[in-house]
Amino acid sequence: MSHIPKSIKIGNNVVIENNVEIGENVIIGHNTVILEGTKIGNNVEVGANSVLGIQAKSNHKMRKVTDSHKKLVIGNNVKVGNLVSIYLGSIISKDVFIGDHASVRENVSINEGTIIGRAAIVELNSIIGKRCTIQTLSYITGDTVLEDDVFIGPCVSMSNDKYMGKKDYKLKGPYIRKGAKIGNNASLLPNIVIGSESIVGAGSVVTKNIDDYEVFIGVAARKIK
């Protein structure tokens, strides 16, 4: 059985499966589905037509999905928009905002105060620090790390497969250190490090590591004073 307190406000056609935990003063929009294994904290708002607690699946060309029984944990005061999908095994900390149409895959950690913009995608096994901003339509590839206070502009794209499936390669996305800022439409190649408080200009293609406090622009991105 699921724990559903009296203080919850539920829209029309909402589905709440067994073994779901829901805190106090939660609002769930119309047609939203809360799947087994989801734990929702207090004062959480979930929009319409969202699905929380999705079990990951794969085929022979995709990496094997471990058959884990981890929960989806959503902390206090989280705001989840409309048409959002969030997978089992992820942890969404308190005061996070997730915009409409966004997707958060399995084994993702999103720390407190972070904003995930409209239609942004955070792929599996990624760690997002505190107070980060990931803007509209950005793609955070799997196995990526963002430290605290990182800014990702609209439509930024990242990759984690150096050989695009042609060779064996340990998938590894970018590592972006504290306070770095990535401009609109920039592309980040696999396994690069973006230094603390550094800036990547809009439309840049980053092919190599960037040290702390540096500014890079261009295709391929080069250092400027």
Image (tube, helix red, strand yellow):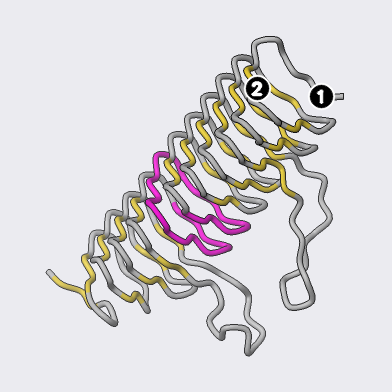
Say which mark, if any, is on residue 201: none
Q: At 62% from the left edge and 18% from the top edge, which residue is drawn?
A: 9
Q: At 78% from the left edge and 72% from the top edge, which residue is drawn?
A: 59
Q: Quadrant of residue 63?
A: bottom right
Q: Vertically, is 155 above or below 104?
A: below
Q: Vertically, is 113 above or below 101?
A: above
- 157 displayed left or right of 170: left
Three-letter amino acid code at the position of disc 1: Ser
- State the image coordinates of residue 2 (x, y, percent, origin top left): 81, 24
- 214 displayed left or right of 7: left
Say which mark, if any, is on residue 2: 1
Q: Quadrant of residue 185?
A: bottom left
Quadrant of the rendering where the C terminus is positioned: bottom left
Badge 1: residue crowd in 10 Å (few <14, some 14–19, many ≥20): some
- State the image coordinates of residue 36 (x, y, percent, origin top left): 80, 37
Q: Give the residue pinned by disc 2.
A: 10
For numbered disc 2, what is the local secondary structure? strand
